Image (cartoon, grey):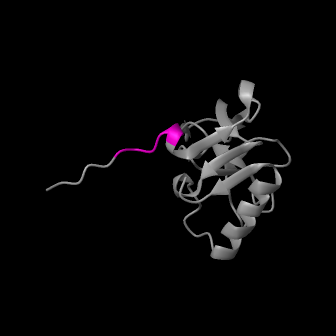
Amino acid sequence: MTAITNDLTLGDLLKYEEENLYSRDQVTVLSGQNLKLGAVIGRVSATQKVKALDPSATDGSEVAAGVVLQSIDASAAEKTNGLIVSRQAIVADHALIWPSAITTEEKTAAIAQLEAIGVLVRQGV
């Protein structure tokens, strides 16, 4: 018997946000990125554009700056219509997408960075 799996939806990820889209930001996603719903992102300091969180980087993307609210494929060229949650929100931990090589310490630090900007990560919600 084949198991049926469904992709995560926005409702699986986002458990609370402020009214009037206050919690959301539209961002430019750097070329070479294919970000899925739930990806934790960092913001490159020099350009303010975003890419997947990279704890080993030194360009600003090593600091968690939000969570992607809709998948966006910028593999070929940067996209200006990325949507992230970056303040006053609650997200479900099971729906977050982390870098594949992230360590437990780096993940703990990134969660603290998200919470510092008002994006709370909660288990079992």
Check if residue 122 falls in the magenta segment. Answer: no
Which residues are drawn in magenta?
Answer: 6-11
Measuring from the top left, give residue 59's x and y in whole percent.
Answer: 81, 56
Q: Is residue 28 left or right of residue 36?
A: right
Task: Tell me where residue 53 sits by quadrant.
Answer: bottom right
Check if residue 7 falls in the magenta segment. Answer: yes
Task: Tell me where residue 123 sits by quadrant.
Answer: bottom right
Residue at the image point whose x is 60% and y is 45% from the top: 32
- Viewer-proximal residue, 65 or 8? 8
Residue situated furthest right in the rendering: 46
Residue at the image point whose x is 80% and y is 62% from the top: 58
Measuring from the top left, give residue 23's x and y in whole percent.
Answer: 74, 36
Residue situated furthest front in the rendering: 125
Residue 9 shows up from this direction = yes
35 is higher (above) or lower (below) than 103: above
Residue at the image point whose x is 68% and y is 50% from the top: 41
> Principal SS element in the magenta part?
loop
- Viewer-proximal residue, 19 or 95? 19
- Viewer-proximal residue, 31 or 114? 114
Quarter of the figure that contains the N terminus: bottom left
115 is higher (above) or lower (below) than 30: below
Residue at the image point whose x is 31% and y is 49% from the top: 5
105 is higher (above) or lower (below) than 62: below
Count of picture labels: 0
- Viewer-proximal residue, 77 or 64? 64
Task: Tell me where residue 3 sits by quadrant.
Answer: bottom left
